[in-house]
Amino acid sequence: IFEVRWSVFLLGPAGCGKTSIWKTLLRAQNNYGEKSVYKPINPKAVTRNELYGSLHPTTREWKEGLISVTFRDMANNQVNLHQWIVLDGDIDAEWIESMNTVMDDNKMLTLASNERIPLTGTMRLLLE
């Protein structure tokens, strides 16, 4: 499904094998010679500002977030054939809303700093 979709949801109860499914696929890709990496992030373990980044209200200085750094690093990477951002945790409106432009046809992460980081052809978003 990652061949035609850039954003995939793996749904099921805890312990049903969701992680085993994507890790098996990743291992198979690497065994086949297709350099594949993943970056796991639990969006519920950090604040929204720590996740996406934030502007200091007084100085207007930008502070990077986990997703902004990960997107930028993967977008600039020319080595890996497959790069997955694995968002592992409960999905709620507080953090998922900011991913709308990534999951739609725009494939673009828009940050509070007005920076736009594209989801490149090697990048995929996996929500578990």
Image (tube, grey):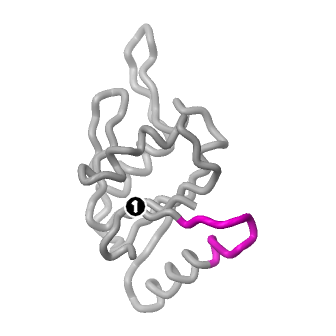
Rendering coords of residue 2 (x, y %) = 38, 73
Q: Which residue: 68% across, 75% down?
A: 17
Residue positioned 58% across, 48% down in the render? 91
Q: Left or right? Give the position of 85 relative to 113.
A: right
Residue 85 counted in the magenta span: no
Secondary structure found at label 1? strand
Which quadrant is the C terminus positioned in? bottom right
Give the left or right position of residue 128, taking residue 112 as reference. Answer: right
Q: How many marks?
A: 1
Read off the residue under disc 1: 7
Looking at the image, is 58 positioned above or below residue 85?
above
The quarter in which the N terminus is drawn is bottom left
Q: Is residue 12 found inside the magenta-colored segment of the image?
A: yes
Q: Among all residues in the image, which is located at the extreme bottom?
A: 32
Q: Residue furthest top?
A: 58
Q: Residues within 10 Å of mark 1 (few under 14, many from 20)?
A: some
The residue nearer to you, when weighing 95 against 121, is 95
Span shown in magenta: 10-20
Eyeballing the image, is 84 above or below 97?
below
- State the image coordinates of residue 96 (x, y, percent, origin top left): 49, 43
Dominant secondary structure of the residues highlighted in magenta in the image: loop
> Is 11 in front, or is 127?
11
The residue positioned 44% from the left and 84% from the top of the image is 29
Amino acid at pointer 1: Ser
> Which residue sits at x=38%, y=83%?
34
Q: Nearer the viewer, residue 24 or 94?
A: 94
Left of 39 or right of it: where is 47? right
**Image: 111 above or below 44:** above
Q: Specify the quadrant of the image occupied by residue 77.
A: bottom left
Residue 45, image x, y percentages: 66, 42
